[in-house]
Image (cartoon, rainbow, N blue to C red):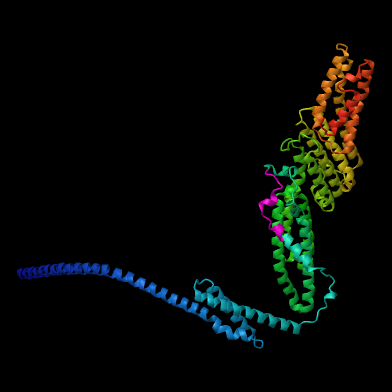
Amino acid sequence: MNPKYSLENVEDDKEELEFLRESLNEMDELSEQTARVLKVFDLRLKNLAKISAPIYKSTEKVARLYVNVGETVNSLDNILKFYEASGHDSAIIISGIQGDDIDLYLSSIKHLHEAESALSKIKLLSASQSQKETEKLIAVGHRNVEKYLSSKAKKGSKKVDPTSYSLVIESLSDLVNSSMDSFNISNNDNPSNKSNITSNPNPASNFLIMKSSPQSQPISTGSSIFRIYSENFIKLLVCERQLIDKTMPDTISRESFNELAEKVYNSYIRSAQRVCEHLTDSIYSNITGSIEFRSVIKDTYNSLDKLLNLEAAGKNEMKVLINSISTPLYKTFTGLIQTLKSTTNKPHVSKSGGIYGPTVMAFELIKNIAECKGKVEEIMYSLGDGHWNERSDSSNLSGQRKPSGLQILSHYIEDYISAISQMIEVVSKQYNQPGSMFAFQANNYHYISNAIKYSTVISSLLPENVVTKYENLTLRNRKALQAIWQSCLSTFMSSNINSNEKIELFNNSFEKICNDLSNFVVYDPDLRGYLIQDAVDSLVPKYSAFLDENKVNRNYLKFPVSAVEKRIDQTYSNKRV
């Protein structure tokens, strides 16, 4: 059993609890006082933060200002050193290179260059004066270095006999002139130099409407000038290679030559790129120039590859140039024929007839292309026979030997001239009167047949029957003109009208034909003679026989036989009655 809890114990516990309660109340008061104190601290800390924040920002600004001032002081110190560079290094520069201590001398020159570059950016009179003094010292330093290197080269190299070179450049002035001409052409961006090409929206038809002008002459000879420039460029590299091999040790000769060649090679590429851009910008107006340029670049590449080993060096700039000119050039051969065959974009025929301007332009162009046959053969062979036709089955022929490039060129020229004849047929329809149309065709076909016969290069590439073809076309139109003249006599066989009426109808018809052809110019005297004789043979015998049969008094005729012959001669000779 538990002992009985006494009353005294209860009282003791009660007292302890009372004491504990009082203690807790005191602690509660102390806690409240502590909380109030902490709140005061918190408020004061917040106020302190508000006060210290601007101070912190000001401190940051002061730190930045300190850094900036330090950098400014350093920059000013450097600038002052540049001001003093001429005085500091003048003794070293003026005295020249002492012994073999070239490193110190070159270091001084480098320091002067840095000073000159810095002073040139300062817009102050004092800086300008210091810059001039620095430039003078730099010039002196360069001369001293040249003298030093020259003396070292003379001591360490053997004498060279210039006559021992296997390749001699005849005249350096030729190189300078050809190089400058090529440079002028490659940098020729003046719009006036393109005045010989109209602003036709179809670039392919520009070759049909070009007009020659004095300004176009330098452009037309640009490629040949570029060939001279390229050949002299190779000659110089060969001579330089020979000179380096004789004057420098084998251990450094190859590297020295490569470093030298790198700079002149890059200069040549820049010039070639400008020429290429000029040619491709108006490829149809520069076809022969593009053919020549492509040939020059290929020849130069082969020579340079032997000298510089371009393949191993990974230099493909010249291959890129060949592709850049070849791609548009290949398309022009098809474009030319398609343009000639097109029924649109053709200049109007002249009222005075004569030879159609585009006929002359087109034939001169193909003649110029044929004169480059050695360079065109390769192009034609790679493109294939008949590639210029919209539907060519030449590539599908099996068991047949592929034609040579010269044979393909011959086929191309034949089709090209055939396209010119198609153009003549199309544009001749611009004439309202059939007489003018037939005279126009006869005039142009006669020109083509003569142009082929009198061009050695064209006639050598074409079969003989081509000339016969255009002579027959000329004859066909002569016969058509004869039929027109004979139409004046159509009423002579009629039995419904009398002879006077027949003569009146003859006069009207004859005069109308003469008026139609009177403004038409036939420049070729042989063709003019043929046309006059054709007309006389068509009219005079039958007209004279009619007058005799009907016993017409020739004294009262408007056109007696002699007058008919005279009027025909005046008509074709473009003489006014």
Q: Position of residue 47 (x, y in %)?
A: 23, 68
- Vertical position of residue 37 compared to residue 134: above or below: above
From the top left corner, tell me how far across and down residue 138 is, in percent.
61, 78
Q: Residue at x 82, y 24 (%)?
A: 511
Whether residue 152 sits left or right of residue 86 in the image: it is right
State the residue in front, 46 or 226.
Answer: 226
Give the residue at x 80% y 81%: 159
Taking the image as drawn, is residue 36 in sight? yes
In magenta segment, residue 190:
yes
The percent position of residue 167, horizontal first and vertical second, equals 83, 70
Q: Position of residue 318 (x, y in %)?
A: 73, 60
Q: Residue at x 44, y 75 (%)?
A: 72
Give the quadrant of the C terminus.
Answer: top right
State the quadrant of the N terminus. Answer: bottom left
Q: Residue at x 75, y 42 (%)?
A: 208
Task: Magenta stretch: give its range.
Answer: 183-199
Task: From the viewer's perspective, tell me whether residue 97 is left or right of residue 494.
Answer: left
Describe residue 56's horizontal placement relative to residue 332 as left or right.
left
* Depicted 7 relative to depicted 365: above or below: below
Q: Is residue 310 above or below residue 282?
A: below
Quarter of the view holding residue 145: bottom right
Tell me where residue 6 sits by quadrant.
Answer: bottom left
In the rendered image, the residue lying farthest to the bottom is 99
Q: Residue furthest front?
A: 555
* Location of residue 45 with respect to 289 vertically, above or below: below
